[in-house]
Image: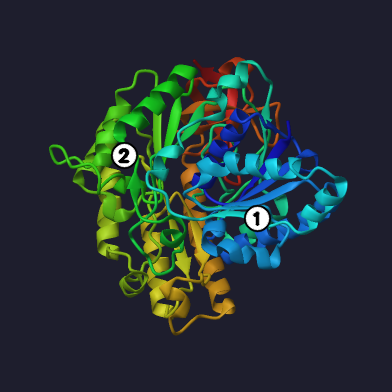
Amino acid sequence: MPSFFIKTYGCQMNERDSEQVARDLIAHGYSPAQREQEADIILLNTCSVREMAENKAIGKMGFLRKLRRQKPQLVLGYLGCMAQRLGASLTEKTPHVDLIVGTQKFHRVADYVDEIFKRQREAHTQEIKELMSSLRYPLIDIDEEINSQNTIRDHLFLTPSRSEKEVALTLATPSSLQSELLQERETSLRPSSLNGRRSDSSISDHLPEEKQSTNLKEIPATAFISIMQGCDMHCTFCIVPRTRGGERGRPLADIIEEVKNLVAAGVKEVTLLGQIVNLYARHEIPKINGKSPFVQLLEALDDIKGLERIRFTSPHPMGFRHDLVQCIGSHSKIMEHVHLPLQSGSDRILRAMHRPYTTNKYRKLVEELRQARPGIAITTDIIVGFPGEKEDDYLQTRQLAEELQFDNAFVFRYSPRGDTPAATMREQLSEEIKEFRNKDLLEVINASALRKLESTVGTLQEILCEGPSRYDPTRLTGRTRTNKIVVFQGEKKLYRQIFQVRILKHHAFTLYGDPCLISS
């Protein structure tokens, strides 16, 4: 059977979607390829959050045209957010593409690939095959589909065929994209997938990374759970409502069953995913005793025997009501880390962004979280250079960042996105101003982040071992409860175990533990 290769650009939601597509392709009899040059099917799961991510995906598809000349029957496709946003217009720059599938049709990809290969088989002669190769017309599906949020539920390492095959999935992002996006986004931490299979990681919510081969017989320590799709907040800078649609939550019972199956297989930690994850199912599930659907879900997961850790990303500040703060404070399985996007420290800019909170409300929320869960790590997203941002607006943001002392942050230079209100606002700032404010704010963020890391040196930290270090396979790695990476020497038997490590030092934004002081 033909083989496939998937490149994933974007957030953890995209990574999870790619895993589902790969699982479906395997179920249809296709096999994963270790390298794109070996594949018969190459799919790009795309991102639209920034223009650069779209340009890189289109550029990559253009590059793959050279590979098509060597392999005329090679199947090429776009998936995900950019496919949803641009649809058939993608054929203007990349007319050789075979498949364009939007964000609500990932579960149809394997069927569409079957259809494309059926077309090829029906071309009986070499002349017709060559003609079809030059006159391809793509399958395009970017329509909405009811209940599409319920289709991202299967996991590669639980695929029924894994006991029969030794298969490996490559979900890759070109290293060139990673380095350029790091420059574009100017984060003070290495990006993270929050996936147990990618242990050298930290707090990224939107940035892509290269995925290494994963033996599907190896049960990971952690797993992503997609609990909802879409967003109804309509921030003026954000393309997500356009590409992902309105909020749609999965049934609570289905999520609980998925987590139970993962735990039965050996998973110790789950990360709940959603564009505004803490507003999960607010339109579908009523409150019970004053508890939101998200709190109901957290409490139900907390009761699952064998599940040791619960994380979630990305929440919205307005979703942190008293019930959620109290839940975080009273349930030890919920990890002491909240990613809490601020976006701006200026109330005027927050209003322009259509963010429904003030800086005082945000400040109070941080205080409540720190009181409810002493030692909790709080990370954030901040945009500099939003249209109309004055010097005083920026200085208010800088001052608030200094005051709140975040554990880390992603700092974005504002980038106009088509189909968003902010793109047509007056007073668009120059790149020079954005660059200056970006670098200046990063100095503040890096200083507070390093102080937080320094405070852990000499302490005992509980970690979940997630496997070999990405950069040094002779070492192991894991994350603290506050989502900080720890690298240490240890035996393979420690994989998927939770234990204490004494922190000896930190280098950049990675902690290092003493292997002599590991206690089981």
Residue at 47 percent across and 53 percent down: it is 448
| Residue designated by label 2 | 374
Residue at 61 percent across and 31 percent down: it is 28
Q: Secondary structure at mark 2?
A: loop
Q: For this view, does 71 lie left or right of residue 355?
A: right
**Residue 193 visible in the snapshot:** no
Count of marks, rendered view: 2
Please tell me how crowded label 2 is: few (under 14), some (14-19), or many (20+) other residues with Cα within 10 Å: few
| Residue designated by label 1 | 138
Single out the mark in the foreground, 2 or 1.
1
Closer to the camera in the image, 280 or 389: 280
Closer to the camera in the image, 52 or 328: 52
Q: Label 1 sits on what residue type?
A: Pro
Q: Residue furthest left?
A: 289
Please tell me how crowded label 1 is: few (under 14), some (14-19), or many (20+) other residues with Cα within 10 Å: some
Residue at 26 percent across and 63 percent down: it is 360
Q: Position of residue 362 (x, y in %)?
A: 29, 58
Q: For this view, does 475 lie left or right of residue 231?
A: right
Q: Gap between marks 2 and 1, in whole Å?
A: 54 Å
Closer to the camera in the image, 39 or 322: 39
Q: For this view, does 257 lie left or right of residue 465?
A: left
